[in-house]
Amino acid sequence: MHTDAVAALKLTHSNVRSGLVREALQHFRNPREAWQAIRQRERSAETGLKQKSALLERGLAWLDEAGSHLIGWHDDDYPAVLRHVPSPPPFLFLRGRKDLLWHPQIAIVGTRKPSAGGLEAAQHFAAHLAQQGYTVTSGLATGIDAAAHDAALHAGTTIAALATGPDIAFPRGNEALYERICQSGTVITEHPPGVPALRCHFPARNRLIAGLAQGTLVIEAAIRSGALITARLAAEMGKEVMAVPGSIRNPVAYGCHQLIREGAFLVAQPEEVAHILSASRSMPEPCRKTAQTAANPPPEAIPPASLNAAQQQVWQALGHDCVAIDGLCLRTGLTAADISSILVGMEISGWVENQLGRYQRR
C-alpha cells in the first residue's frame, strides 16, 4: 500500500496529463506499475518532483491518519457519476465517510455575500432535503455554501468539495465547519494534501459538485459567479437545475433569474425540489415515496386578520423589497412619524425586520 501511495502522489504532483494517468491506471490496475510505465514513456514525468518532496511527505502522513482515503480511477470505490465529468480526476482524496459518495445528493450553491433571506432559504432547503434522505453537497465557501452545510449537518449528511488539498480548510473562517464535516460527513478533492487554493481550482471544484449531485439548486447568485458555472455544468451533464427567485432589486438574485429564463426550474419550497428529483430515474424508493406525499402548497405569507388596517397598509407597501422609511412614506402617504410608530409595533411582533435602516417582511 505504501508504494502504491507514493506512486499515486507522484502521479498527482507530476505534470503528466490526467488522461494519460487514467489510461495507465485502467491498464495496470495499480498506481505503482502505472507510474513506472509513465516514467519510461514520458521523460519529463519526474520534472519538479524533487522540489515537492515536502508535499509528498505531507501526503503520506495524511494518508496514515484515521478517516483519510485515496481512491484511484482503477478502484471500484471510484464514484460512477464522476467518471462522466469533464476531465475526471485520476485520484480522489477524501476525509470522512466514503459511503456518502454513493448516496443520493442535491447540490446547494450560491453567493458568498447573501442577504438574510438568502441564508434563511439555504438553511431551510438544506435541512428539509437532508431530512428527506438527501446528502447536501456544496463547496465550503462562505455564505450560501456554509449555511447549507451547517443546516444539513444538523438534519442529516453533507459533502464538501474542496478547491484545496483535503487537509486545508478554505476559507479559514470555515475551519470549524470543515472539522465537523470531516467528523460526520465527507470532504472530497482532486488535490493532494498541502495544495493551496488557486483561482483555477474553483471551476474544477465546481464540476465535482455538479457531477456528484443528482440536481443543483442555486440560491442567490450574481450573473458572473461560480454558482452559475456549477449550474451550467450540471445542465450539460443532464442533471436537474433549479433556482430560487429573488427580488428584482437584489443583485445576487439576477443569476437565479437568468437560470430560470434559460430553463431552470423555479422553486420556492423544498417540496418542489424533492418532487423534481423524484421524477429522475435515479431516485431511490424511500425518497420517491416521501416526495410524492409532500405536495402541500406554500403557506400564506400572513393571516389577513393578524394586522390592523394601518399595519396592513405598511405591509402591502413593503412588498418583497427592503425599503427605507422615506420610501414607505411615498408609497403610503403617511408621515415618517406614523410609519416609524407602525414599524416599531410590527418589528416587536416579528412581522418585519430592520436591515441597516431599511425594513423588509420577515
Image: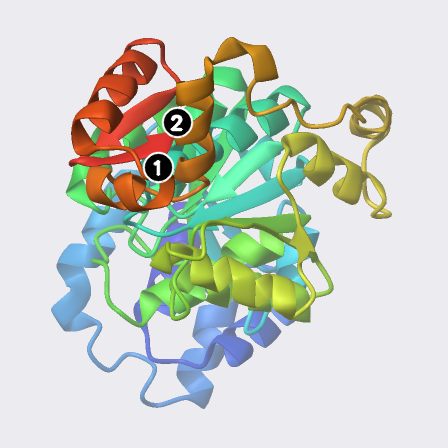
Residue holding disc 2:
150
Looking at the picture, tell me which residue is in the foreground, 3 or 128: 128
* Mark 2 secondary-structure assignment: helix
Circle 1 sits in a helix, a strand or a loop, which is it?
helix
Q: Position of residue 16 (x, y in %)?
A: 40, 80
Question: Does 50 sit above or below residue 206?
Answer: below
User: At 80% from the left edge and 28% from the top edge, which residue is drawn?
Assistant: 291
- Is label 2 in contact with label 1 (beta carbons under 8 Å)? yes
Q: Residue at x 27, y 40 (%)?
A: 329
The image quarter in which residue 81 lies: bottom right
Dot 2, crowdedness within 10 Å: few (<14), some or many (≥20)?
Answer: many
Structural distance between the alpha carbons of marks 2 and 1: 6 Å
Q: Is residue 297 visible?
A: yes
Q: Report the residue marked by disc 1.
A: 146
Label ID, residue 183: none
Q: Nearer the viewer, residue 154 or 38?
A: 154
Expressed as whole percent of the image width and height from the top left, the position of residue 15 reads 33, 80
Residue 8 falls in which quadrant of the image? Answer: bottom left
Residue 186 seen from this side: no
Q: Is residue 8 left or right of residue 37?
A: left
| Location of residue 303 in the rendering, given as x and y in whole percent from the top left corner | 59, 15
> Would you place residue 139 above or below residue 54 in this image?
above
The crowd level at tag 1 (other Cα within 10 Å; few <14, some 14-19, many 20+) is many
Q: Amino acid at mark 1?
A: Ala
Residue 359 higher or lower than 73, as above or below: above
Report the residue at 35% width, 24% height from top: 352
